[in-house]
Image (spheres, rainbow, N blue to C red):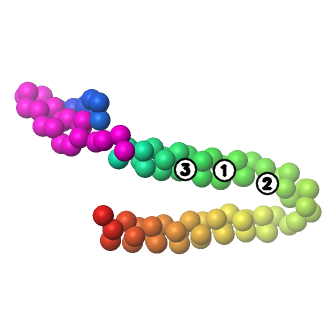
Amino acid sequence: MKIYLILEKFLIIIKFEEGFIIALTKIDKKDLYPIILACILLFLSISCQNMLIPSYAAIQEEFNIPEALIAIPDAFFVLVSAGFALIWGYYTDRVN
């Protein structure tokens, strides 16, 4: 049994191989904007983190800091991200 997921004009449709079609939900444009914004923000966050790692050698040379201290900004970033993920997860579970 094959299942196809079709997105047609903000309407999610599941089509089975046997010919059954189920329309799951209709998504309005106003409901799609927060999803697009979240995807853009996630892309920027991951891009910023990935641009920092290749520049470690230049940062270490410029500021004359030991290699052990170069990971402190990354550790802080991960801890703050984890804290906000917990808060955001709790908030989104409780609020509709």
Q: Residues within 10 Å of mark 1 (few under 14, many from 20)?
A: few
Instruction: Let me know if residue 13 is in the magenta part.
Output: yes
> Which residue is identified by label 3?
41
Q: Give me the C-alpha separation between circle 2 and circle 1.
A: 13 Å
Residue 59's place in the image compared with 5, above or below, is: below
- In the image, 94 versus 30, the foreground residue is 30
Q: Residue at x 60, y 66 (%)?
A: 78
Rendered location of residue 80, percent (x, y): 59, 69
Ranked by sequence position, the earlier of labels 2 and 3 is: 3
Is label 2 in contact with label 1 (beta carbons under 8 Å)?
Answer: no
Mark 2 or 3, closer to the camera? 3
Q: Give me the C-alpha separation between circle 2 and circle 3.
A: 24 Å
Q: Is residue 41 left or right of residue 56?
A: left
Q: Residue at x 32, y 71 (%)?
A: 94
Whether residue 27 is visible, yes or no, is yes
Q: State which region is magenta.
A: 11-30
Instruction: Let me know if residue 3 is in the magenta part.
Output: no
Give residue 56's mark. 2
Give residue 90's mark. none
Mark 1 or 3, closer to the camera? 3
Q: Give me the C-alpha separation between circle 1 and circle 3.
A: 11 Å
Whether residue 3 is visible, yes or no, is no
Element at badge 2?
Answer: helix
Q: Is residue 10 left or right of residue 16?
A: right
The amino acid pointed to by label 1 is Cys
Ranked by sequence position, the earlier of labels 1 and 3 is: 3
Element at badge 1?
Answer: helix
Q: Is residue 1 left or right of residue 12?
A: left
Q: Quadrant of the N terminus?
A: top left
Q: Quadrant of the C terminus?
A: bottom left
Q: Farthest front residue?
A: 30
> Which residue is identified by label 1?
48
